[in-house]
Amino acid sequence: MRIRCSLLIGVLVSHACSRGNDDDASGVRLPAGGPDPIVVRVPTAGGPVRAYRYPNLDSLVWRSSEQSPAIGTLLGFDADNGTMAFTDAGGIPGWIDFRSGTVRQPTAKPLSLIASSQGFAIFGVSHERNVIRYTPTGDWKQETEARVRRLFPQPDGSLIALAQIDKAQDIVLRYRPPERGVVDSLPLSPPQRSAGTPLGDRVYFGVGRELVGVPTGDFSSPARIKASDEILAIAPTPSGDRVYLATKGAKALDVVDRYNGAVSARVRMGGFTTELRMDPLGRYLLARPVEGDSAWVVAIATGSMVGTVKTVWRSDLPAVAPDGAIATLHGPDVEFVDPVHGTVLIRVPNGGKDTWSVVWWNGFRPRAKGLDRAVTFQTEEDDQELVSDSSAAPVTRDSTAASPLPVAPRTPDESAVRDPEPAGETPRERGFTVSFAAVLAEDRARELASSIRVDGVSARVVASRTDGTTVYRVVLGPYRTRAEADRVGRESKHSYWILEGPP
């Protein structure tokens, strides 16, 4: 189970604190604190992936060592592993690894309806009408009899699928990989539009002029709300408290209050709207007019349209930047525009040749000096030397010395107070372990371990119990320094974590 709602909530809180009591929609600024805003640029025709720390788009902070294929869509980012999921132009999924600089595709067969919630698991449908999940640690396949129309991966690792029974009826299905079979189902009239919430607690379907909100954890009692007309586009806010609807024949957006179950407000627009795109931080909503290359900007806080920006629409652009500017496509260039005043803040010549995405991650920050120093321990012999010559500098020994346990100083410095060890326990031997996976199936763990070999050493499986459940971890190490462990992880060509201490 992989839940990353805390990252989204943390970013939202940082943004809220940074704006203070500013009700004016004008002006753009970066959220205070939190992970770094990283702009990822992938050449649409294929090539090295590049990363920049926003807003310094002329200063490269990272480049991949391998080239990406021609890109179709960037699907999502896994902050735990430092990987970005994508689909290439031929419909084949893969991951860009920001730690190793590599690009990996788990299959050579194209999929349809490819989707990913947060970049770790990639779901799609094969030509054999099987629903398939690819992850860096294992795959999953579910045979289906009905034709799948849409996939909604959830942050907790489950999957909601919309499938067609016949022309008059669809069915909503819930799966929980790696378990086989359908966990829950709900018959539904065929919807024309659909969207899931970022937090994964609802999936919304537009059936004519009715909005059907299905709780993802329990399909019972779905909410049914009447819109002003036939629903053309659905955009929930990041928190899920409101849902914006573009409807047929209306020059306004319906705003649905999820808690009172009704349309609570309307936002006047400059004309008819055909597409909606929500800011991941919940500040702005971008609306696409039926005609013309532009985007209408709606301020969520004030519930009003505050500006119009010129842009071509494609899967990655326009988008709301970390500081609230609007990233637009203008000819061959990408321009970041103030949403209210229309001022061009940043221009990236020929930026339109890349596919763009913004992620929040601290993985590109410089490491602190001395963080990867070898672990050393003081021994009884060292103590005797210190007693015989109090003027001598402290002597330390390698962690492979005969006595591996640290000896507490006899006269500790009050400026360096340490928490006492729990009664009956000895200080833990230090080091760094490379962890590749933690799974519940021993055979899957051993299969993965057999595929990992670095410096002539194969990964091994370590079993442990957590809350009564046996977990099988695939590991290498421990190693004396984090730098050595990180090198081993990169050379493995697999996603990995560095853990302090033995496995």
Image (cartoon, grey):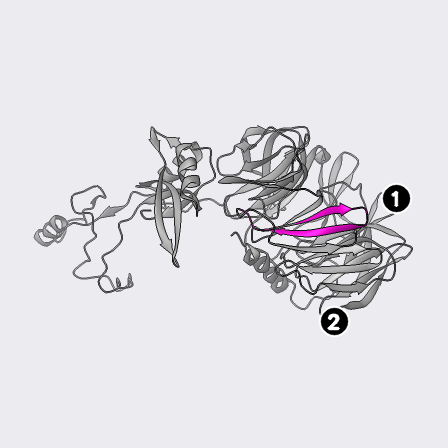
Query: Could you tell me if residue 317 is visible in this image?
Result: yes
Q: Is residue 392 above or below residue 141?
A: below
- In the image, taking residue 457 as reference, residue 181 lies left or right, namely right
Q: Nearer the viewer, residue 493 or 449?
A: 449
Packing grade of label 1 (10 A; few <14, some 14-19, many >=20) is few
Q: Position of residue 260 (x, y in %)?
A: 74, 71
Dividing the picture into quarters, in which one does residue 490 lie? Answer: top left
Which element type, helix, strand or loop, lies under badge 1? Answer: loop
Q: Which residues are magenta?
A: 161-177
- In the image, taking residue 190 as reference, residue 79 lies left or right, namely left
Identify which residue is drawn at 58% across, 31% down: 107
Dividing the picture into quarters, in which one does residue 478 lie? Answer: top left
Query: Could you tell me if residue 136 is visible in this image?
Result: no
In this rendering, the label closer to the viewer, 1 or 2: 2
- In the image, taking residue 322 as reference, residue 33 lies left or right, namely left
Dividing the picture into quarters, in which one does residue 264 lie? Answer: bottom right
Q: Amino acid at mark 1?
A: Gly
Label 1–label 2 contact, CB within 8 A = no
Q: Amino acid at mark 2?
A: Asn
Which element type, helix, strand or loop, lies under badge 2? Answer: loop
- In the image, taking residue 386 as reference, residue 105 lies left or right, namely right
| Residue 157 included in the magenta stretch of the image | no
**Is most of the magenta stretch helix, strand or loop?**
strand
Q: Position of residue 183 (x, y in %)?
A: 59, 53
Which numbered disc covers residue 138?
A: none
Q: Nearer the viewer, residue 389 or 208?
A: 208
Packing grade of label 2 (10 A; few <14, some 14-19, many >=20) is few
Which residue is identified by label 2? 260
The residues tagged by marks 1 and 2 sit, at their Cα atoms, a distance apart of 36 Å
Which residue is identified by label 1? 292
Q: Position of residue 398 (x, y in %)?
A: 22, 42
